Image: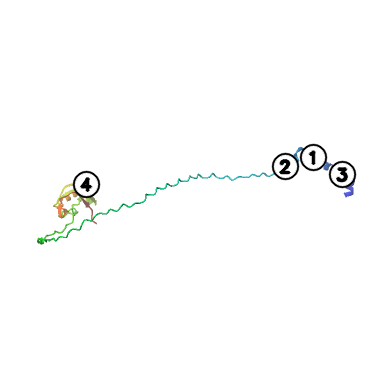
Amino acid sequence: MNFTQQQKSPGRQLMGFLVVVLLHVGLIYALVTGLGTNIVEVIKAPIETKIIEEVKPPPPDVPPPPPPPKLAAPPPPYIPPPEIQIAQPPPPTPMATVATVAPPAPQAPPVARVVAPSVPDSEVGARAINNVKLVYPPRMLDQGREGRVDVTCDVDADGGTSNCVVGQTQGGQVFADAALAYVKAARYKPAIKNGVPVAEPHHTFAIIFKLGS
């Protein structure tokens, strides 16, 4: 269909006129009811701006200034004491003196002394000096058992023992009896104090029963 035929069709012209009328009616309705205003307001809504003020912290507590120092009063001026003149006594009159010197006293002849050699202090000897034999209990020897016994005695100045008491024992009473018999029969080197033998009470001897390799 060409343009001339379209111009001659009254139906199409009427349809175009109705479309234009409907558009105008819709636009007028939107303006009357405020719908167009809302659209315009939404599109052209102003941008809100807000100024945020910086919050400053409170000033720190400043201590009050210290009081001014107290000035000490100046010392009084120094006034020297007055000079006192003391009269000097007259010099003594020289006198002639005669001094007598006693003759030296005669010296006593030297006395010869014998100095004994110093002997260091020592305790009671640990080993017997009278060749007494320590008897190993036969039963313990057969069983291959060993032991140790501590015996406390008073050691006299001549090396003999007395008041012997059995203390700690390892291995059994058989070892304790053998150790006590040995210490009672033994004689030891006595203690020395200032070069002299002295008695020593409560001296402990350790008697060890050990099998040889």
Question: Which sits earlier in the primary sequence, circle 4 or circle 2?
Answer: 2
Q: Mark 1 points at which residue?
A: 28
Give the residue type at disc 3. Gln
Q: Could you tell me residue 119's position as x and y percent?
A: 16, 57
Question: Which sits earlier in the primary sequence, circle 1 or circle 2?
Answer: 1
Question: Which sits earlier in the primary sequence, circle 1 or circle 4?
Answer: 1
Local secondary structure at mark 2: helix
Q: Is residue 5 left or right of residue 82?
A: right
Q: Which mark is residue 41?
A: 2
Q: Which mark is residue 2?
A: none
Q: How far apart are marks 2 and 3 (CA)?
A: 37 Å
Question: Which sits earlier in the primary sequence, circle 2 or circle 3?
Answer: 3
The residue sitting at 85% across, 43% down in the picture is 17
Give the residue type at disc 2. Glu
Question: Which sits earlier in the primary sequence, circle 3 or circle 4?
Answer: 3
The residue sitting at 72% across, 42% down in the picture is 41
> Which marked residue is nearer to the observer: mark 1 or mark 2?
2
Quadrant of the image occupied by residue 105: bottom left
Q: Mark 3 points at which residue?
A: 13
- Taking depth in this image into account, of 162 and 213 the one nearest to the observer is 162
User: For the residue carrying disc 4, how many other residues have a C-alpha within 10 Å: few (<14), some (14-19), or many (20+)?
Assistant: few
User: For the residue carrying disc 3, how many other residues have a C-alpha within 10 Å: few (<14), some (14-19), or many (20+)?
Assistant: few
User: For the residue carrying disc 2, how many other residues have a C-alpha within 10 Å: few (<14), some (14-19), or many (20+)?
Assistant: few
Q: Could you tell me residue 110's position as x and y percent?
A: 10, 61
Q: How far apart are marks 3 and 1 (CA)?
A: 23 Å
